[in-house]
Image: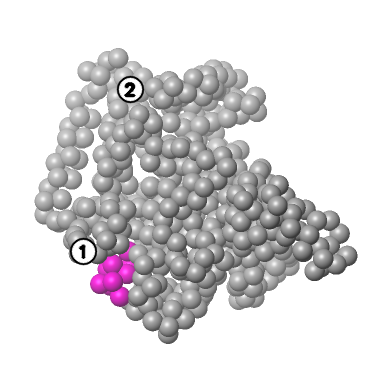
Amino acid sequence: MNLRVLALSAALFVVAGLSVPVVRADPASEASVFIETLAEDTVRALTVGEVPRSERISRFRVLFNDHFAVEAMAKWVLGRHWRRADAPERAEYLRLFVDYIVASFVDRFAEYAGEKLHITKAIADDGISATVFSEIRLPGGSKTPARVNWRLDGVVGDFKIVDVVVEGVSMSTTMRSDFGSIIRREGGKLAGLLAVLRKKTETLRTAN
Amino acid sequence: MRFSSTPHREWSLFRALGVLILSLFVTAGCASMPDPTDAEAVAEFEEINDPGEPANRAVFEFNRGLDTVIVKPAAGMYRHIIPPPVREGIHNALNNLRSPVVFFNDILQGEFGRAGTTLMRFVINSTIGVLGLGDPATDFGFEYHNEDFGQTLATWGVDEGPYIMLPIFGPSNPRDAVGLVVDFISDPLNWWATNTDREFITYSRSGTRAVDGRARNYDVLEDLERSSLDFYAAIRSLYRQRRIDEISNGKSSAIMPAPGLSDEPILPGPRRSPDEISISQ
């Protein structure tokens, strides 16, 4: 345990008063708790009862905005093109980024949410970033469960997901390649990507 | 080893594929080079490492056509008609038949513990597992893992080289394409089939593997095709990431670049972790 984490936990304890029953100062186990809680919230939001898809989408949007480092992910996926973009372009890109992720992952998360998430281990690096390793037995899958790693940034009490890695395939890295390819095709213009994103998001939202 | 036992017909197939690829690259040309003064664009170009992109995209479209007409409908029907336990049995049997190649590559990689696991699996599943249809070995603690000669070359320090989309076989690179050929000719079942004039065994096994693999990845591919902006680029990224994961035996994600919470966009660069693992890529 390092001093920074200890100090932070102490500060959190003071701020939150007695409403914090246990102060878990170990960032790795805190990270595990964060993912476990999120998994439970997702199950509750997406699978309980017959929730219509439009409602699932809006619930998933709330979860995504609350638990993912949305802006950091969006910037990283865009890479160098973010710096060249002007303010209105950035604003539209951020909005489309959320719309796109929510529409493309809602069905997958709803499907996974019904399965038991088993956390195998968690590692923390200086208390500012952590990786939670988990396994999910996919519906109709084989004996071997799928490895899902959750990469977090931030500090204890304020973790945000920056990447989800399924069987070695990173969501952020794949999007970075995908988006980058469109920008190159559009002659390096962000406007080209925005047009494609707009269209794609609309198709995804109305699907099913 | 009896490399000479590889049937003439297969060699002709490999050669024909080689000629086809070469002519495609000549006719379709190469990916346009970025402005050499733009360091970031150059870095991106090198990271993508797909100099033959126009030709690769042409082959990709050909493969998609093939998939739409033959492989996908076959995989769809297979999923629809054959009940899951039977499909699982077929998958197990295919894995069991691959054991000699996996074992061979375990040894070449110096992974003697894993080679032992592969051997135990082969013995248990071929007997108690009834010709490999069952997988009791997993319950005994001998879990399946895959290896191939492309991975072996990677552990020996061979670079993957540029991305190549092979006709029929799909995403690859020079290293993995060599691996594909070596795995084929080092497979004892293929020697046996050839030496006894039973090539149909080799073909039906390849066909079954294709359908089994496509059926198992049916939903994932469907999902990716639906949600990606550029399916070709998404597949390219997916293939590379999967290979890195396979080469490191599932221990790669700890050193992958990821977005951070700082204000500036994070350039690709490993984030350190306590149990940092070195891999060859």
Identify the residue position indicated by label 2 in the image. Answer: B186
Callout 2 amino acid: Ser
Give the answer, above or below, for where A22 lies relative to B133.
below
Q: Residue at x 88, y 65 (%)?
A: A18
Secondary element type, mark 2: loop
Identify the magenta region: A181-189
Q: Position of residue B80 (x, y in %)?
A: 51, 50
**A184 in the magenta segment:** yes
Amino acid at pointer 1: Thr
Q: For numbered disc 1, what is the local secondary structure? A: loop
Q: Nearer the viewer, mark 2 or mark 1?
A: 1
Residue A110 visible in the current orientation: no
Residue drawn 36% across the image and 67% down it: A80
Specify few, some or many for label 1: CA neighbours under 10 Å numbering under 14, 14-19, or 20 or more: few
In depth, the one of A111 and B32 nearer the eye is B32
**Circle 2: is it few (<14), some (14-19), or many (20+) Cα within 10 Å?**
some
Res. B178 image quadrant: top left
The residue that label 1 is drawn on is B37
Q: Are marks 2 and 1 in contact (CB under 8 Å)?
A: no
Q: CA distance from mark 2 to mark 1?
A: 47 Å
Chain designation of label 2:
B
Closest to the observer, A193 or B143: A193
